[in-house]
Amino acid sequence: MTGGTGGTGGTQPQRGEELLLARISAAAGRAHLGRRCATYAAHAHAAPAGGIRGLLALVRSGLPSVARANPDARLDLYERGMTVVVRGRIRIVRYDTTSAFRQDRTFTLTDAGGERITLSRGEAEEWIPEIQRAVTDAQLPLALARLRRGERLAFGDIWLTREKVGSGVVSAQWSQVQRTEIRDGVVVIGVAGAGNGPEAVASGIPNLFVLRALVECLRTESGHP
């Protein structure tokens, strides 16, 4: 399977492929995911037990090699979410609610039921930025609205409010924030005039790409160039 808009090639699909596509379309329709945008292949890893602690242990300690992955995972990307088919099971991922953790070779998402799906890039890594863009588009406006209502948000060990960003007891006003960068696997919030700003291990931060977009929006709104 390769990137595309719904199809997998010019040849007549096998009966089994037709039935699978019908099941995928029906599941996406029930979940109101909208129009199909692309289809990709990926490798899927078995998820560990242990809830969110198991997930964090997985992303921090590494994953099995690609040689142990299932090469038959199918990703169908839609306007408001995606389906993932592994061993015939169809999983629904919603862009507005999923949590994604990224490592060098893997990408872990939570599905609509809160279960984890860990995928490896293989040769088709273009689906990762597509998913990141879609999740950011869905979650950034919601996160900004919550902050403006006075809520406090947490991305792993990094927390944000309308006035400041911090980790643990270290915090900074948005007008002090200059940038977000990753150094040796650690996300660092660069703060003007400070040796150490808020920081956290990157692999333990859900939707790191959404966090970076939020930081950029809020520091810009504060008037920082």
Image: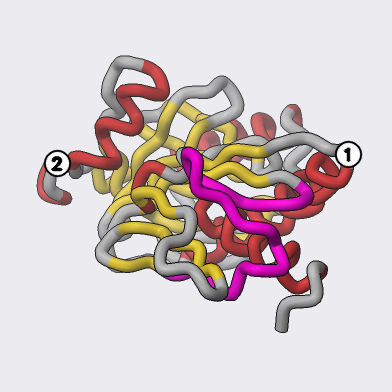
Question: Dot 1 corresponds to which residue?
Answer: 149
Q: Is residue 56 left or right of residue 113?
A: left
Task: Name the main secondary structure of what is drawn in magenta.
Answer: strand
Residue 170 located within the stretch drawn in magenta: yes
Q: Is residue 108 left or right of residue 106?
A: right
Q: Position of residue 64 (x, y in %)?
A: 14, 41
Q: Position of residue 54 (x, y in %)?
A: 31, 23
In front of the other: 51 or 39: 51
Which residue of the protein is positioned furthest toward the top in this rendering?
Answer: 50
Scheme of colours in the image: secondary structure
* Mark 1 crowd level (few <14, some 14–19, many ≥20, 10 Å Cα): few
In front of the other: 170 or 225: 170
Q: Position of residue 146 (x, y in %)?
A: 81, 40
Quadrant of the snapshot with the N terminus: bottom left
**Where 36 sits versus 218, above or below?**
above
**Where 63 sits versus 52, above or below?**
below
Is any atom of residue 54 visible in this view?
yes
Question: Dot 2 corresponds to which residue?
Answer: 64
Q: Position of residue 47 (x, y in %)?
A: 30, 28
Specify start and end residues of the magenta stretch as a single range: 162-181
Query: How far apart in space, not on screen, are marks 2 and 1 (Cα)?
Result: 42 Å
Is any atom of residue 15 visible in this view?
no
* Mark 2 crowd level (few <14, some 14–19, many ≥20, 10 Å Cα): few
Q: Tell me which label, 2 or 1, sits earlier in the chain.
A: 2
Could you say which disc has been placed on residue 1 in the image? Answer: none
Q: Is residue 53 left or right of residue 198?
A: left
* Residue at point 65%, 68% (across, down): 176
Which residue of the protein is positioned furthest toward the right in this rendering?
Answer: 149
In front of the other: 160 or 213: 160
Q: Label 2 is placed on what type of residue?
A: Pro
